[in-house]
């Protein structure tokens, strides 16, 4: 499937490479670098780049490009999903997936990659990988360098020999607990009148399950019909979901993504914030007006926090003299990027940013007003209205501690002015 994998940083340096079938020259990445130069932002690099003899498929996460090289046609989403699993596995192994960490633990990284694609067959289950290749605590790293020993486990993973390959046998905990995080990311485009042009929700349910033995869990929802476009972890019994809309599964040990879902019906997507704006550029004269106010909307009484507002101003704007009612703002006269760190929104006193813009004398009025991009978080709220009804456990005698958290955050949230 994948011949080679190259890890490339934002500066365009290849700092790690792995070859499975045959060694592919680094020069193949020149096609990727050309596409990177043409793209205005790192996220805009095409995920599939055809070359005369190869296809380059890439994902960009944690300021690193993961570029896979393939020689024959394969389903591109299959490769892209595998690359995302590589990133998630690195994060699970090393705590963070960053260039310095991967460079210092490159031996373990290559061993993990070797196991993740064994003779062309992907194996991405974290529990199995951790039994095959032990994660690198500091003490083991020191001992390994002194003795020359390896990270490779001396036994086959027990999960491989059972009908539940994602869970090892003989798991024991003194505190038995199961936590579930429902995280929703809202992507939206709002037009200048405040109407929704497009809005959709990407949601995930991440789990941290530390339970003794071989528990069998069921998770039910108040309104499961919201979940129409769903992707499950292999542990979920799909037939039961189809017939009863109940999640029934034997969970992997530790952290895993139970499911991801997508809500695209406009009537189901509530917009939690609004922006009032008044931005004017004069045809003649060197001053323009700028005023924006941010407020909550359809938040079920929950606080909106971590609010940041950014806007790419036109080239004709030389400087900005603004006064925020709360938070801090910066304007970069070189990149023309305005950034306003708002913080929490108090519904009794809405945050606003007002002032004037210094414009280039003689410059023509911009063709269009700048767009406003928002980032925010709302704790204990799933904006789609999804709610967990109950979580039950069968097959074990003890009573576990259970917890469920909700969070909504902005993805690509854009307001046109």
Image: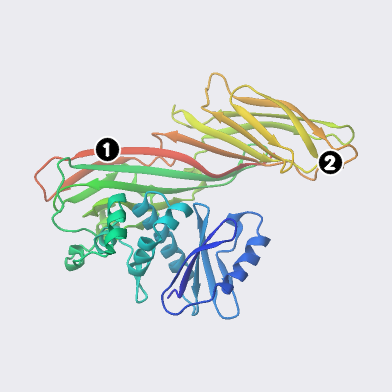
First of labels 1, 2 by sequence position: 2
Q: Secondary structure at mark 1?
A: strand
Q: Horizontally, is 334 left or right of 364 in the view?
A: left
| Position of residue 68 measured from the top left corner of the image (x, y, whole percent) | 49, 69
Q: Circle 2 — which element?
A: loop
Where's residue 59, x and y in %? 51, 60
Whether residue 371 sits left or right of residue 361 in the image: it is left
Outermost left residue: 397
Residue position marked by numbered label 1 in the rendering: 403
In the image, residue 114 sits, relative to residue 229, either above or below, namely below
The quarter of the picture where the C terminus appears is top right
Q: Is residue 33 above or below residue 394?
A: below
Residue at image x 58%, y 38%? 374
Q: Is residue 129 above or below residue 216?
A: below
Pick out the residue farthest to the top: 348
Residue 57 seen anywhere in this rendered image of the structure: yes
Q: Image point 59% across, 23% down: which residue? A: 326
Residue 178 — which label?
Answer: none
Residue 113's spot in the image, x, y percent? 38, 66
Residue at horizontal 32%, vertical 67%?
Answer: 123
Using the image as rendered, state which of residue 79 and residue 61 is in the foreground.
61
Nearest the camera: 362 or 152? Answer: 152
Residue under label 2: 365
Local crowd at mark 2 within 10 Å, few (<14), some, or many (≥20)? some
Q: Quadrant of residue 51?
A: bottom right
Q: Residue furthest front?
A: 146
Please state the horizontal and vertical placement of residue 53, each as a whole percent of the image. Answer: 56, 81
On the rendered structure, is 107 left or right of 201? Answer: left
């Amino acid at each position: 499937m994948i011949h080679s994998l190259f890890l490339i940083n934002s500066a365009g340096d290849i700092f790690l490479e792995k070859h499975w079938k045959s060694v592919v020259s680094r020069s193949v990445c020149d096609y990727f670098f050309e596409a990177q130069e043409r793209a205005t932002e790192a996220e805009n690099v095409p995920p599939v780049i055809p070359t005369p003899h190869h296809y380059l498929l890439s994902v960009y996460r944690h300021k690193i490009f993961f570029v896979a090289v393939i020689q024959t046609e394969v389903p591109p989403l299959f490769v892209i999903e595998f690359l995302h699993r590589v990133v998630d596995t690195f994060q699970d192994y090393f705590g963070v997936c960053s260039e310095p960490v991967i460079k210092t633990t490159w031996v373990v990284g290559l061993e993990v990659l070797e196991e993740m694609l064994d003779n062309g067959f992907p194996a991405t289950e974290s529990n199995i990988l951790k039994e095959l290749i032990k994660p690198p605590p500091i003490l083991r790293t020191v001992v390994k360098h002194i003795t020359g020993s390896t990270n490779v486990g001396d036994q086959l993973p027990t999960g491989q020999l059972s009908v539940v390959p994602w869970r090892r046998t003989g798991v024991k905990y003194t505190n038995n607990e199961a936590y579930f995080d429902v995280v929703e990311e809202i992507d939206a485009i709002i037009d200048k009148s405040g109407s929704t042009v497009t809005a959709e929700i990407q949601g995930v349910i991440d789990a941290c399950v530390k339970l003794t033995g071989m528990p069998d869990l069921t998770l039910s929802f108040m309104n499961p019909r919201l979940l129409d476009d769903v992707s499950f972890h292999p542990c979920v019994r799909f037939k039961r979901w189809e017939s009863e809309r109940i999640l029934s599964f034997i969970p992997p040990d530790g952290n895993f993504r139970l499911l991801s879902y997508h809500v695209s019906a406009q009537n189901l997507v509530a917009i939690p914030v609004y922006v009032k704006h008044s931005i004017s550029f004069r045809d003649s004269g060197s001053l323009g007006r700028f005023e924006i106010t941010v407020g909550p909307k359809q938040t079920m009484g929950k606080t909106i926090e971590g609010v940041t507002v950014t806007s790419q101003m036109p080239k004709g704007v030389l400087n900005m003299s603004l006064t925020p009612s709360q938070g801090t703002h910066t304007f970069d006269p070189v990149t023309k990027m305005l950034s306003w760190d708002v913080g929490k929104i108090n519904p009794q006193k809405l945050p606003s940013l007002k002032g004037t813009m210094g414009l280039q004398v003689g410059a023509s009025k911009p063709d269009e007003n700048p767009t406003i991009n928002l980032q925010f978080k709302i704790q204990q709220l799933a904006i789609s209205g999804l709610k967990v009804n109950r979580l039950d456990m069968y097959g074990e005698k003890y009573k576990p501690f259970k917890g469920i958290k909700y969070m909504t955050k902005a993805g690509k949230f854009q307001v046109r002015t």
